[in-house]
Amino acid sequence: MSNMRADRTYWLNLFSPRTWQEFRAAGGAVSGFRETRWRTVQRIRPGDYLLCYLTQASRFVGVLEVTSEPYHDDSPIWAEEVFPCRVSVRPLITLDPEFGVPIHNLRGSLSIFQVNPNAWSGHVRGSPTRWKPEDGEAVVRALEAAQANPVEWPVPRTGRRQPRAIPVGNDAFTVPGPEAGAAPAAAQERSDHEATAHDEIQWLLLKLGNDMGLDVWVARNDRGKVVNGRHFADLPRLRKELPRQFDEVTNRTIELIDVLWLRHDAIVAAFEIESTTSIYSGLLRMSDLLAMQPNLHIQLFLVAPDERRDKVISEVNRPTFSRRTPPLRDVCRFISFSTLRAEVAKVGPYVSFLKPDFIESLAEACVADEGE
């Protein structure tokens, strides 16, 4: 199968163990992606290869050859989501998860490990994502070898109970519009002092961190905000002061970041919410923080409406951010408003059992496709 064509493009195609099973059970003839990815899906061409990766098992399990132009189809294949942006495919390799190729086995072969070995996961957080030809070829060769000489690699348990979707309305997570099309109903529920989308998402992130047992910080000038009758300042784990290990200049930057999650005095994650304001200002805060504290290893997230995704990723890839070491795109992830709302609505009863890496599972890499 290793007939490498010069004009072939390799795309990452993410599956969970469940969606991989459903894909194979349906005949393995169609792969699908979220509606928000339609612009990128349109770049996929017949003859391209989809590299199938299991997100909860951190391994490659298959190669699919695209056999059609992209199209829309809502017919059921997967139980929990429609994934309407589709291409027809021909399976070249499909492995059971326990016989897949753990990504860490390819540490010496993939460029995603070379610049910043600790930032590799950012490259497997969204699909379809275009991969470098040399990386795509390395994955194909590894999967061919795994098919010819199977080696069993136990699939790790996530340790997290997989929740089912529940009706929105749990007091801890009453959020307007868990689905992208629910905005009109949400608008009716808001009071005369309705919150902006920015404030709503800010509250959601603060409440999520608080309920997971983390300390939380909100930008100093936002402490007095109220969302649907809930005061930011009433959150029991809201920090009044920042950790003292940073110098005064760093603290002045950190205190303006929209939301921070902390465990004791260590920052676990930082979030900039870009609803209608300039994306550039939030990126500068992230970049300044890393420039002033180059040894600081925290997760950085840009949270924005679905329609601003391409703009956010374009800004992250501007030369001023791409030329720093490591590039900002390697340490920042993107989360859409709709994804955050929908996923938080699902986990209400289980939130106290979640770990901070739950938020990373919702994010995608800020790596621009070629030509963007």
Image (cartoon, grey):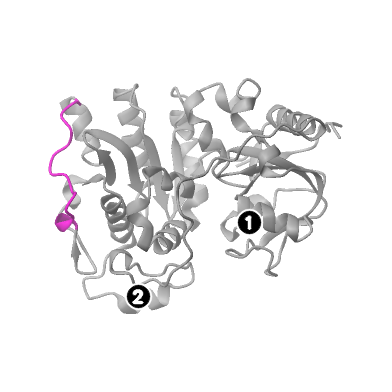
Tell me: residue 38, above or below residue 4. below
Q: Could you tell me residue 199's position as x and y percent?
A: 28, 59
Write the residue at 21% across / 71% down.
193
Q: Gap between marks 2 and 1, in whole Å?
A: 27 Å
Pick the residue in front: 315 or 230.
Answer: 230
Residue beneath disc 2: 187
The dominant secondary structure in magenta is loop
Q: Which of the two labelled residues, at mark 2 and mark 1, occupies the earlier sequence position? A: 1
Write the residue at 78% across / 29% down.
145
Q: Which label number is shown at residue 38?
A: 1
Q: Could you tell me residue 272's position as x and y percent?
A: 34, 45
Q: Is residue 236 magenta?
A: yes
Tell me: residue 338, above or below residue 184. above
Pick the residue in front: 221 or 116.
Answer: 116
Mark 2 falls on what kind of element? helix
Q: Residue 115, can we see it?
A: yes
Number of on-image labels: 2
Q: Residues within 10 Å of mark 1 (few under 14, many from 20)?
A: some
- Quarter-wise, where is residue 8 in the image? top right
Q: Is residue 172 magenta?
A: no
Left or right relative to 318: residue 201: left
Residue range corresponding to the magenta coloring: 232-246
Left or right relative to 330: residue 170: left
> Which image quadrant: the C terminus?
top right
Write the residue at 37% across / 45% down.
355
- Quarter-wise, where is residue 130 in the image? top right
Mark 1 falls on what kind of element? helix
Q: Which label number is shown at residue 236?
A: none
Write the residue at 24% across / 36% down.
254
Kind of residue at badge 1: Trp
